[in-house]
Amino acid sequence: MKRFALAAALAALVAAPAALAITDAEYTVIQKAANQYLQAIPANGNFHVSAEDVYKRIQSGKNDFVIVDVRVPKDKKFDQGHLPGAIFIASDQFARPENLAKLPKDKDIIVHCDTGQVQNKILTVLHMLGYEKAYAMKWGYMSWKVAPPTGLTLGEINASITKNYPVEK
């Protein structure tokens, strides 16, 4: 029943952007699944690994992990360069059964996108589906290599933080 509730919640989450309307029953299922997920977040507040940690794992030669690149479009991102040994699954197609079948539940799964935003959505989906060994590479591909849109992203961040916006205390 627990797996069914999580699957139903995930299905509703995937369909929600298109429909933008859910029933009260669907809301309750999603709310319970979301609460369960949030309660399972580790004490350090995340499921992230650093680029340095990923590099050390690659260098170790062990095969106890899978790196998944979710950057799109594939021809302009993954095909132009990716982490050694990474596989590609498009972020918008990640939850399809044929793509989930590529992911072993007995190995660590390290997901990354360009900046970290998309990978965290994928990470949530993986944990809600029971992939307890799923992690995201902190800051995404931009923590690995400066490449478009990384340079643009860093430039936008820098332009924003130099404005010294006010903070309340």
Image: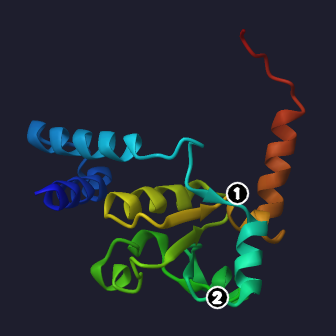
Q: In the image, what residue type sits under mark 2? A: Lys
User: Of residues 56 and 67, which is closer to you in this image?
Assistant: 56
User: Of residues 145 and 18, which is closer to you in this image?
Assistant: 145
Q: In the image, what residue type sits under mark 1? A: Trp
* Residue 162, visible in the rendered structure: yes
Q: How far apart are marks 1 and 2 (CA)?
A: 24 Å
On the image, numbered disc 1 is attached to which residue?
A: 139
x, y percent for residue 94: 40, 73
Q: In the displayed structure, would residue 128 be above or below residue 158?
A: below
Q: Give the farthest residue toward the right.
A: 162
Residue 136, quarter of the rendered image: bottom right
Q: In the displayed structure, would residue 65 be above or below residue 43?
A: below
Q: In which quarter of the image is the C terminus?
A: top right
146 horizontally vs 141: left or right: right
Label total for image: 2
Q: Do the residues labelled 1 and 2 touch (CB within 8 Å)?
A: no
x, y percent for residue 93: 39, 75
Q: Residue at left 48%, top 70%?
A: 91
Residue 62: assigned label: 2
* Label 1 secondary element: loop
79 horizontally vs 7: left or right: right
Q: In the displayed structure, would residue 138 be above or below residue 73?
A: above
Q: Nearer the viewer, mark 1 or mark 2?
A: 2
